Image: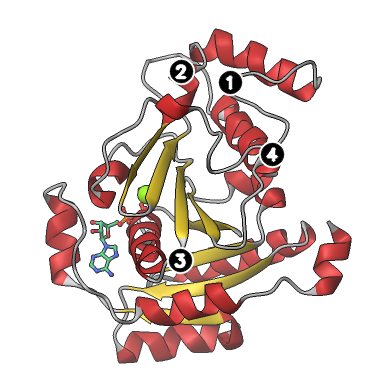
Amino acid sequence: MKIMICGKGGCGKSTLTVLLARALAGIGKKVLVVDADESNLCLHRLLGIHQPEIMMDAMGGRIGTREKLKQASDHQHEDDFFKQVMTFDNLPAECVTEADGIKLLVVGKIKEFGEGCACMIGGISKAVLSRLQEKENEIVLIDAEAGLEHFGRQIDKSCDLVLCVVDPNYESIQMADRARQIAEGAGVQTYFILNKVDDNVREIMTSNLESQRIIAAIPHNEEIFLQSLTGQTLTAGMPQIEAACTFITSYRKPLSLNMKM
Ligand SMILES: Nc1ncnc2c1ncn2[C@@H]1O[C@H](COP(=O)(O)OP(=O)(O)OP(=O)(O)O)[C@@H](O)[C@H]1O
Ligand SMILES: [Mg+2]
């Protein structure tokens, strides 16, 4: 199952990706975290996993990547980066690190002034996710860049589910509803995880969202905040994440959506 974790800037996408990855690995799932955010640098630190070689760098930077993406789209041949069928086990070895049942793949990062836009990084994400065939016990969590651009790049088309993290502000709520609408157009269902909420805020947010799509409500947690502030591994226990895990492990894509794809 491939799950896109999206939402407004700073809502908690990376935090929730890490908490979900840990919780799912804790119940025996094999998890691949795909860092698809071209800007943020520290997901590996939050996960407590060494940073692998960035895939775009391993592919020869922009020049090498352009060529490889073209070959991949022309189906010219398989190479070390884009197999016709990609699996958890045949991903390019130097681009994957692993700890405690969680693998990490980092797609690409913007590093230099004027190097070009992030579309190429989106192109790699799309090429990998569209080829990746995970097994029943394997879950892919994609930590998206902030906002809706991944939809514009059609990266979500290969996903089974979109989880939109919604923190307490009006813009975040509006974006969550927009994400739901856009994903539906691609045949993918969106569910919401409320983040940084107390009971009062939760009630207000629930009345402004399709409440049956809310699968978990995560409170502000000072330990998480401080670990994140100091670039440490997130180790804080968060029992509320279990509801999201249960939802994920029991989720079956509606048949009508399977047919649409
Ligand atoms: N439940 C929580 N309790 C306390 N702090 C939180 C919680 N969720 C997220 N945060 C804090 O909010 C900030 C933003 O979180 P995070 O980096 O996960 O957001 P993001 O959506 O991935 O951001 P970006 O859009 O930059 O990728 C961080 O300081 C993080 O520690
Ligand atoms: Mg992030």
Residue displayed at 49% across by 48% down: 144
Checking the image for residue 80, the label placed there is 1
SS label for mark 2: helix
The picture quadrant where one finds residue 94 is top left
Give percent across and percent down for residue 213.
59, 81
- Asked if the residue at label 3 sits under 8 Å from ligand 1, the reply is yes
Q: CA distance from mark 2 to mark 1?
A: 10 Å
**Mark 4 lies on residue:** 131
Checking the image for residue 178, the label placed there is none
Q: CA distance from mark 4 to mark 3?
A: 26 Å
Look at the numbered discs 4 and 3 and tell me whether their residues touch, using CB distance below 8 Å. no
Dot 2 crowding, Cα within 10 Å, few <14, some 14–19, many 20+:
some
* Drawn side of residue 208 relative to residue 260, left or right: left
Disc 2 versus disc 1: nearer the observer: 1
Q: CA distance from mark 4 to mark 2?
A: 18 Å
Q: Choose between 92 and 61: the one closer to the eye.
A: 92
Q: CA distance from mark 3 to mark 2?
A: 31 Å
Three-letter code, disc 3: Val
Give percent across and percent down for residue 251.
62, 75
**Mark 2 lies on residue:** 58
Look at the numbered discs 3 and 2 and tell me whether their residues touch, using CB distance below 8 Å. no
Q: Residue 104, relative to residue 244: is it above or below?
A: above
Disc 4 versus disc 3: nearer the observer: 4
Ligand 1 located in image quadrant: bottom left
Looking at the image, is mark 1 or mark 4 earlier in the sequence?
A: 1
* Viewer can see residue 159: yes
The picture quadrant where one finds residue 95 is top left
SS label for mark 1: loop
**Mark 3 lies on residue:** 165
